[in-house]
Image: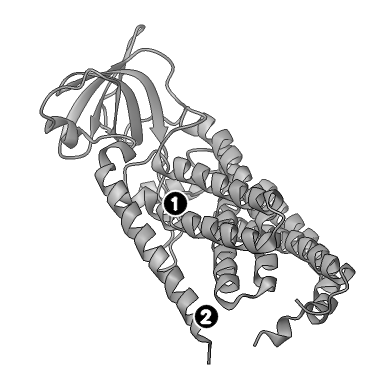
């Protein structure tokens, strides 16, 4: 039905696409550590040596772990396997709350202690009106 | 093949379709805005900031959809050596580009009150920024070169390079840790967005799709008129 040139051009495009997909896959695979935006407490526990540079750690704010005094905020980030203590001074975003996602930027003091310079609230994929949330909470 | 596609035949349809699409767009947009800004409830956590989503999410979807369409038509044009496909691609690009920028800007406006930052170099946001750059390259190529053959080849190549980015945008939130939340709407499983918020979102998506269609038709008609003025009946 189609001419020989049409078929050739089709396979040419297919070849280009396969090559590009494989190349991109290899590049992303080798850059994985830099592509991720934050590390989990479990990943922090397993690192060989403590990085002096600024890093980001993310997870859930542990229930009943927020302590606020005049100077600073203390809380625990958990991924339900491991935990890390965070100390921070400054304003926190509105959505920062216990049991919610958070990403902190700052410096690792040791494997259990993190000094944050910035706090970002991580929003989850759930959207619902307040009444529905209350109804879910009652269950 | 592609006989139906000849410009003088489609022009009759596309030139008339514009006003109907415009009418439909105004109706759907009015309903969508009413739903999104007035009737839909606040979110339990973000309160009114959730309303930004009704612009942000459709804009992002449409910019991805249009880029995929541009790639599809460019590849068809390249394989079948049909000029019309390239003109369709060319006419689609501007609205995709604009919606991509809208998605980034509204995302930034939403990010400040919700995350606490205007911008984060996470995988989803960065890959969307890369898509804008591909759109820009695609549009610029049509202006740089005068030789049509050259434009066709280079623009097709840009779309093929850019299309690799589209699945990366889609799955970036699943493959890597990102600040951006994962998808709320799943075709196969239950969506994690309440129906009172889902409907305005879908209506706004329809409105934006109609807007892209409108801009596309206007652009495309211009291209067809240009061909007519050159005194060519066929492509």
Residue shown at the point (40%, 28%) measured from the top left: A120
Crowding near the residue tagged with mark 2, few <14, some 14–19, many ≥20 C-alpha atoms within 10 Å: some
Q: Secondary structure at mark 1?
A: helix
* Secondary element type, mark 2: helix
Q: Mark 1, chain letter?
A: B
Judge depth for marks 1 and 2 and give the one in front: 2
Task: Name the side, left or right, on which A4 lies relative to A84.
Answer: right
Circle 1 sits on which residue?
B169
Q: Please provide percent x and percent y for residue B232.
A: 84, 75
Q: In the rendered structure, the residue with mark 2 lies on which chain?
A: A
The quadrant of the picture occupied by the N terminus of chain B is: bottom right
**Which residue appears at 59% of the width and 58% of the height?**
B155
Which image quadrant for residue A58?
Answer: top left
In the depicted structure, whether residue A96 falls above or below residue B221: above
Q: Where is residue A139? Give x, y as percent.
A: 34, 52
Q: Is residue B35 visible?
A: no
Q: Image height check: is A138 above or below B66?
A: above
Where residue B57 appears, x then y in whole percent?
56, 51
Look at 43% across and 62% down and name the residue there: B186
Task: Tell me: residue B46, above or below residue A84.
Answer: below
Q: Position of residue B58 (x, y in %)?
A: 59, 54
* Of B152 and B21, the residue lying toward us: B152
| Point 68% across, 71% down: residue | B83
Tag of residue A6: 2
For the residue pair A102 and B44, the one nearer the viewer reads as: A102
Which one is nearer the viewer's eye here, A80 or B150?
Answer: B150
B7 on left or right of B84: right
């Amino acid at each position: 039905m189609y001419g020989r040139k049409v078929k050739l051009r089709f396979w040419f495009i297919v070849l280009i696409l396969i090559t590009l997909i494989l190349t991109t896959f290899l590049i992303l695979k080798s850059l994985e550590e830099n592509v991720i935006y934050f590390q989990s407490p479990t990943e922090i526990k397993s690192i060989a040596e403590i990085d002096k540079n600024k890093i980001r750690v993310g997870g859930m704010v542990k229930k009943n772990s927020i302590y606020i005094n005049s100077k600073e905020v203390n809380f625990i980030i958990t991924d339900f396997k491991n935990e890390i203590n965070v100390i921070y001074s400054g304003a926190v975003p509105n959505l920062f709350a216990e049991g919610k996602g958070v990403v902190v930027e700052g410096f690792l003091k040791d494997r259990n202690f993190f000094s944050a310079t910035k706090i970002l609230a991580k929003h989850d994929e759930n959207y619902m009106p307040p009444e529905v949330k209350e109804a879910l909470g009652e269950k | 093949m592609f006989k139906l596609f000849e410009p003088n035949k489609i022009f009759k349809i596309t030139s008339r379709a514009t006003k109907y699409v415009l009418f439909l767009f105004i109706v759907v947009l009015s309903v969508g805005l009413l739903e999104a800004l007035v009737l839909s409830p606040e979110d339990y956590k973000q309160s009114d900031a959730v309303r930004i989503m009704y612009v942000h999410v459709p804009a992002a979807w449409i910019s991805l959809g249009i880029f995929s369409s541009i790639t599809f038509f460019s590849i068809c044009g390249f394989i079948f050596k049909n000029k019309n496909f390239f003109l369709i691609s060319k006419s689609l690009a501007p609205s995709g580009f604009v919606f991509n920028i809208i998605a980034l800007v509204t995302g930034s406006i939403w990010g400040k009150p919700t995350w606490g930052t205007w911008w984060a170099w996470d995988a989803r946001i960065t890959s969307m920024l890369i898509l804008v750059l591909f759109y820009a390259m695609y549009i610029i190529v049509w202006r740089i070169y005068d030789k049509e053959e050259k434009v066709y080849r280079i623009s097709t190549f840009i779309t093929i390079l850019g299309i690799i980015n589209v699945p990366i945008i889609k799955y970036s939130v699943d493959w890597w840790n990102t600040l951006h939340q994962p998808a709320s709407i799943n075709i196969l499983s239950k969506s994690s967005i309440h129906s009172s918020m889902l409907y305005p979102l879908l209506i706004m998506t329809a409105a934006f799709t109609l807007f892209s269609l409108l801009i596309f038709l206007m652009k495309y008609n211009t291209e067809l008129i240009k061909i007519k003025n050159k005194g060519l009946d066929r492509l």
